[in-house]
Amino acid sequence: MYVSVRECFPLAIFGGIKSGLDAMGIDAVELEYFRDHTVYSVDSAQGEKASLADGAAIDAFAAKCAALNVRVSALLLHNNFAANDLDAELRWVISAVRAAAAIGTNAMRIDAYMTTEQEWPLKKRVSRFAECMNRVLDATTDLPVEMGIENHGLQGNEPDFIDTVLNSVNHPRLGIAVDTANFYWYGYPLSRVHKIIEYYAPRVKHTHVKNINFPEDQREIQRQIGWGYDTYVSPLRQGDLDMRRLISALRRAGYTGDLCIENEALNHFDPPGRRAALIDDAVYLQELLGER
């Protein structure tokens, strides 16, 4: 395992991806893949985009990453498998898989969110999601990119939805992109969150790592979805989730991918504090990875 970070954080806090990675002492970043087949340029200080739309553009981007010693740990998609033009949506997802493979990235985050997730019954949602994933997998059989459905939003934090989709598709390249705090955000008691993540550890393909520090009397009860999140979301070292325990579970399951920092507590700090918090998140994860 190794440490990475979502690109929005070094861009916002350090003014650029490469400068942020250097400050944090890491070399890996997750990049969002946009609808126009672009990602943020790894050497930009202004948030410029780099195209991944064709072979020449991909080669140029890969060469820049190599020259800067930056590796792309994963591509992140904000897909919607309830889109009106589903064929176009799937062509875009498939293009992302091909782009990831071409730049040497072996993981991709699939969004569990669907615009119909509060309207369609579970069976219909699962059927549509599984159909879409099967189509993407069938179109990319020659590629090594693994895809993780993030436990994001409402249905993404329902184990019944995740399990039924994964079991229906039953493909070794499909698993979960586990967000360590989202099950806790959803309202599950702390002890159940640890058990859920340990249960999914063998199927983890990618991660988002963040933490929450709820008041003690709120930790082991079922809370309302999203209760207190903006107030209590915290840097990794300060939260309730036992990162040492979760990393150990991933290690036992044979996971070798990234631990991708997603610190959503930065608004609690002034600018120097935000920089210090991101740097400490990286230091903390590296400390835990160094333990045996």
Image (tube, grey):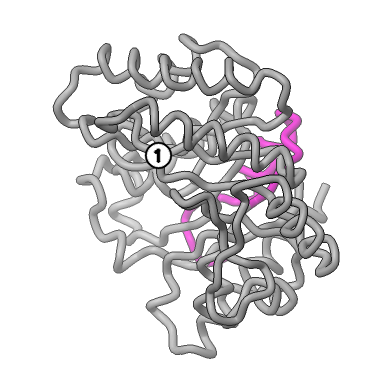
Provide the residue designation for mark 1.
79
Q: At numbered mark 1, what does the secondary structure look like: helix, strand or loop?
A: loop
The residue depicted at 60 percent of the width and 51 percent of the height is 243
Q: In this view, does 128 lie above or below 75?
A: above
Q: Is residue 145 above or below residue 282?
A: above
Question: Is 233 left or right of 205, judged from the image as shown?
Answer: left
The residue depicted at 56 percent of the width and 76 percent of the height is 277
Q: How many marks?
A: 1
Please state which of residues 225 and 13 is positioned toward the viewer in this rendering: 13
Which residues are drawn in magenta? 237-259
Which amino acid does the dot numbered 1 rest on? Asn
Residue 287 visible here: no
The residue depicted at 76 percent of the width and 72 percent of the height is 25
Residues packed near mark 1 inside 10 Å, few (<14), some (14 to 19) or many (20 plus) = some
Question: Is 254 left or right of 167, judged from the image as shown?
Answer: right
Please state which of residues 184 and 147 is positioned toward the viewer in this rendering: 147
